[in-house]
Every structure is written in structure tokens, then in C-alpha cells.
Image: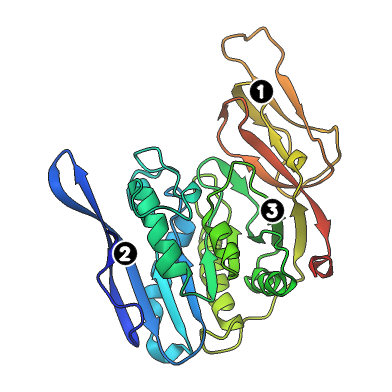
Amino acid sequence: MVAATIELDRPGKHIGQLRLPRVTNTSGWSNLTLPLGVVANGDGPTALVIGGVHGDEPEGQVAALNLLRALRPADLTGRVVIAPCLSITASQRYTRLWPTGANLNRSFPGSPDGTLDEQLADYVTRELIAAADIVVDIHSGGRSGLCLPWSEMHWVDDPRQRAAMVKGMLAWGTDWCVVYIDIAGGGLLVGEAERQGKIVVSTELGGGGHVTAAIHRLARRGLENVLRTFGVLAGEPEPRAREARVMMATELDDYVLAPESGLFETLVDLGDDVEAGQPVGRIHFLERPDREPATILADTSGVVCVVRAIATTQQGDNVCVIGREISPEQLA
């Protein structure tokens, strides 16, 4: 049974752990422990802040840790529950997936009788997401993808929920915002939060296996801005430096896949404008140096939002994402 060592509904600031029972080859009785904190003051909304759903995405983990250390009850007009890293064993190995091969972001809503990742997903679903008004799930491209630093959202059908999510997406302050779909199956944390009617704010803050100081600043500043926008953190949100460019990547053809396995060479950079039919990359073949590389063409026109960061590529890997620019008003 997953359990927290702190009471999440108590006023004040409390830092503890989530504990998941497990058995290992070196211990018949063991717990997997995850960091967990809560800061609460007043009757305002509850925000759930999550980092490290994928272990190779440190941006959200660092931002959540910074927030947890910095927050004081006097700063709040509500409650912030912070889970800095839900995939701690993956984070320690700097991998996307758990050592078991589980992808926590395909495990929701989970099961109390399932595998360890499913038990954790079940707890997060029932105890953390259910109690929140706003769910902030911080992601990046990890080691394999280099993304424009953006805040993001799914298109949801309920107009009030969608309007609030647009507000949160724009509040982060990123120059880019993306409405996206997931092409790798269901079970997402944000999908479960959306199903529960929550205001969901997420990001893809760069990636490619490294994090710049500018990205760390954007993660921290954007997170605080979202909490202020929804009245959880006291104070006024920082105004935008410039109008956001909003992109729609909601068609399967926007996600360009490798037609063969080999070494990927990108022919485009982030932010480039491309036309349908334009070459965006090539696949080279080490076993056949005499063979011409396979050219990968864009299926849609728009702006390059993601480029694969790893040269070694398997058939079917995503190598590029292309978004179409729209106005924020078109999301109403």
C-alpha cells in the first residue's frame, strides 16, 4: 500500500516521503521512497506540482525542489502539494523509463493491485490529483528530443476547462505554446487529470540531454507565474515580455517518423518554417556506406517544434514535430 509520511491537509510546511512497498534481491522488506512536500495557508485553491514523471527530464525536478525549499506558508493563499520526482529510480539512472521498463506516463489511472508503477499511479490519481484544482506536470524532451521551450495543453471539449487551461498555458511565459496530441498510447498523468476536470498545465522545456541556466530560470519563473495566476501563490504574475506564438500539432502527420533504422541527420532547426514535401532529415546506414541516405519529408507545413536529439534511430522513432501557428483566440 502506497502511503505518505506527512498529512497533506495540515496547514504549514511539511516535507516527507511517499513510500511504496517493494521486494528487491538485497532486501525482502523494502520501500521505494519518493520526495513529497506540502505548503498550505488559507482557503485558496490547491495546486499539485509534479516533476520527474520521466527520469531523464531534470528541468521539472529541479524547479519543484527549488519551489519546495523556497515556499513559506505566508507566501500562499491556498495549498501547494509538491512531488519533485515520481520516477526516482529512473532519475538516478538518467533514463526515461523505470529499470523495470515501465513508463509511468502510460500507467494512469493505475491499480492498487498492479505493478509498482501502477500502484503509484493509482495513489497519485486518487489522493493527489483528486484533491487538486490545478495540476502542473513539468516535462521536457528528455535525452531523445530537443523541443522549443514551450508550455502545452491538450484540446479538451469542455469550454470552461479549456479556457482555464489556455490561461495557465499562457501564464508560464514561454515564447512558444503548443496544443498537442499523444501518438504513443494512453495512460498519461495529464489525461487522467483532464478526465477529472482539473486545470492542467504542462511543458516541454527544451531537452536533448542538457539544461541551460536560461531553461532553469524559465522553469522556476513560469511555475511561480502559474501559481500566482490561479491565486495559490500571493502576488501578481510577471507580465509577458512578448506575445506567445501558439502552435497546433494535433494531426498524426505532424509527427514525422523514421522510415528506417540508422543514423539520423537533421536538415532543419527548431523554429524553422517548413513546407509539406520538404526534406527535414536523412537516415544514414553504417552497414552500407555505398547506399545513399534515406530522405525524410515533411507531411505537413508549419514550424519545426521538435527535432530528434539522438543520432542512433530506430524505424518508427519520432524525428521531427511540425506545428501550425494559430492565434490564442482560436482556442476559445
Q: Nearer the viewer, mark 1 or mark 2?
A: 2
Question: Within 10 angstroms of label 2, few (less than 14), some, or many (20 or more) residues?
Answer: some
**What kind of element bears circle 3?**
strand
State the separation of the CA atoms marked 1 and 2: 41 Å
Q: 290 or 95: nearer the eye?
A: 95
Q: Residue at x 76, y 45 (%)?
A: 251
**What kind of element bears circle 1?**
strand
Residue beneath disc 3: 180
Residue beneath disc 1: 283
Locate the C terminus by quadrant.
bottom right
Identify the amino acid type marked 1. Answer: Ile
Can residue 170 be seen here? The reply is: yes
Disc nearer the start of the sequence (1/3)? 3
Residue beneath disc 2: 35
Residue 258 versus residue 35 in the image, above or below = above
Specify whether 141 is left or right of 272.
left
Can residue 85 be seen here? The reply is: no
Question: Within 10 angstroms of label 1, few (less than 14), some, or many (20 or more) residues?
Answer: many
State the separation of the CA atoms marked 1 and 3: 26 Å
Disc nearer the start of the sequence (2/3)? 2
Instruction: Give the numbered dot on residue 320.
Output: none
Q: 118 or 15: nearer the eye?
A: 118
Q: Are marks 2 and 3 in contact (CB under 8 Å)?
A: no
Identify the amino acid type marked 2. Answer: Pro
Which quadrant of the view contains residue 327? bottom right
Estimate the x, y position of residue 154 in percent, counting from the top left.
67, 58
State the separation of the CA atoms marked 2 and 3: 29 Å
Disc nearer the start of the sequence (1/2)? 2
Identify the amino acid type marked 3. Answer: Tyr
Specify whether 298 is left or right of 40.
right
Q: Residue at x 77, y 70 (%)?
A: 243
Which quadrant of the view contains residue 42? bottom left
